[in-house]
Image (spheres, rainbow, N blue to C red):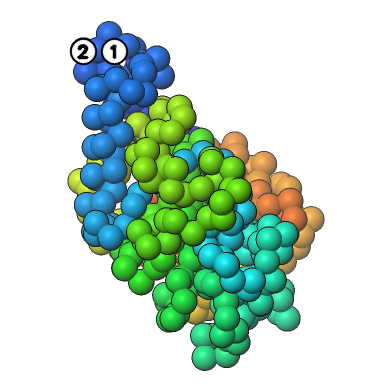
């Protein structure tokens, strides 16, 4: 029996994706090989790779002005690769500090440039998204970076920032969870293991004019131009992860991204309602307009019950509810593969747990 997995990543996959991968596991389309075994330069894998890109372009309506790169190293490597490529001779970059992941990006950028914190929510423990009217951008910054969804802190941008300089976003935990106007961005990046695949693959969507900004001495693997010119096959790409994302994109096309977005909103509503109507038994610390639809964090009023909560939940088939070690409490990740039924089960469990323990 499969657990209902609310883990933050690697995360639950749609069962249809797993089934399809299982059917094709030993012999992909009559090739006599698993995708794991084939040459990345052979026509079979090239067709898998091209189809995945085509499908992603279709889902997000990505124009030809943008390159889509299929890379390795996670979002974490992009924390460094973004400044290396996008500074283009400038010394400053603007960052919005909204929590743990923004901070990780800032820390890496600081090795390479002067970071101007355009806005920060640190004054109130990363519990809100600062309104853009209060941001202080610096004039000579090369780009503006923000973290669209703070996976650990449980906040999410409900808007796309306006920016005159290239807008860069870490969308590791909400890319493909909602419709998106790609043309507002210079660069979008994210690991696949939350909403669109498995670990090992990092997607970068980059506007073409930003491809050639890396300095001369940049290691070849850290230069976007290398990957753009070689269709992300300068070296062996993460073939199997790329293939799984292709299946995931097709699953999204079948449902439609608009419908996925609606489902994700309804899922979050169910859970926040369960928290908000618990008369303080459960508490979510995030300001209402900044609440993440993807990662819903909550605490129990009686913190001593939290271990019991996650243990009993696990016995009931509800896995992955423990909060990140840095913030404690509970965290429920409602990525694309989690269904409304799953969330309703969790809400009922919470209600029963409250009745038994208050
Ligand atoms: C998970 C996550 C990361 C880290 O991703 P890796 O693929 O492990 O490097 C970075 N940013 C955000 C917002 C994330 O959710």
Residue 291: x %, y % from top left: 52, 71
- Depth check, front residue: 24 or 322: 24
Residue 81: x %, y % from top left: 57, 52
Estimate how packed mark 2 is, as few (under 14), some (14 to 19) or many (20 or more) residues with alpha carbons within 10 Å: few
Residue at the (37%, 63%) spot, across then down? 209
**Does residue 330 show up?**
no
Quarter occupied by the C terminus: bottom right
Residue 21, image quadrant: top left
Task: Please say if 193 is above or below 324.
Answer: above
Quarter occupied by the N terminus: top left
Residue under pointer 2: 30
Residue 53, image quadrant: top left
Q: Do labels 2 and 1 touch, CB within 8 Å?
A: yes
Residue 351 as seen in the image, left or right of residue 248: right
Residue at the farthest bottom position: 133
Residue at the (41%, 28%) spot, across then down? 239
Residue 63 as seen in the image, left or right of residue 142: left
Query: In the image, which disc is placed on residue 27?
Result: 1
Residue 358 as seen in the image, left or right of residue 296: right
Residue at the farthest front position: 216
- Depth check, front residue: 162 or 178: 162
* Helix, strand or loop at mark 1: loop
Residue 66, image quadrant: bottom left
**Does residue 135 show up?**
yes
């Amino acid at each position: 029996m499969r657990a209902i997995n609310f883990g933050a990543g690697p995360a639950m996959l749609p069962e249809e994706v797993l089934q399809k991968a299982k059917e094709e596991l030993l012999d992909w389309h009559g090739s006599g090989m698993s995708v794991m075994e084939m040459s990345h330069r052979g026509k079979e894998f090239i067709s898998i790779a091209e189809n995945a890109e085509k499908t992603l372009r279709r889902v997000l309506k990505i124009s030809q002005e943008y390159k889509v790169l299929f890379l390795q190293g996670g979002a974490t490597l992009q924390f460094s690769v973004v400044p290396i490529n996008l500074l283009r001779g400038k010394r400053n970059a603007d960052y919005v500090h909204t929590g743990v992941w923004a901070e990780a990006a800032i820390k890496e950028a600081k090795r390479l440039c002067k970071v101007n914190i355009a806005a920060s929510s640190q004054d109130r423990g990363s519990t809100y998204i600062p309104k853009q009217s209060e941001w202080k951008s610096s004039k000579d910054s090369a780009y503006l970076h923000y973290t669209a969804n703070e996976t650990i802190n449980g906040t999410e941008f409900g808007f796309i920032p306006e920016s005159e300089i290239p807008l860069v976003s870490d969308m590791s935990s909400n890319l493909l969870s909602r419709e998106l106007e790609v043309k507002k961005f210079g660069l979008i990046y994210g690991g696949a293991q939350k909403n669109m695949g498995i670990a090992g693959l990092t997607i970068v969507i980059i506007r073409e004019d930003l491809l050639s900004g890396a300095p001369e001495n940049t290691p070849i693997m850290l230069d976007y131009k290398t990957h753009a010119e070689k269709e992300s096959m300068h070296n062996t790409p993460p073939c199997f992860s790329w293939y799984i994302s292709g299946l995931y994109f097709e699953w999204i096309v079948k449902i439609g991204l608009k419908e996925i977005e609606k489902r994700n909103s309804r899922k979050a509503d169910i859970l926040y309602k369960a928290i908000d109507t618990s008369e303080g038994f459960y508490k979510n610390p995030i300001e209402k307009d900044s609440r993440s639809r993807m990662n819903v964090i909550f605490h129990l009023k009686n913190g001593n019950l939290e271990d019991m909560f996650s243990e009993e939940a696990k016995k009931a088939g509800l896995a992955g509810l423990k909060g990140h070690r840095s913030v404690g409490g509970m965290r429920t990740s409602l990525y694309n593969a989690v269904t409304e039924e799953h969330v309703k089960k969790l809400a009922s469990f919470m209600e029963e747990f409250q009745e038994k323990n208050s």
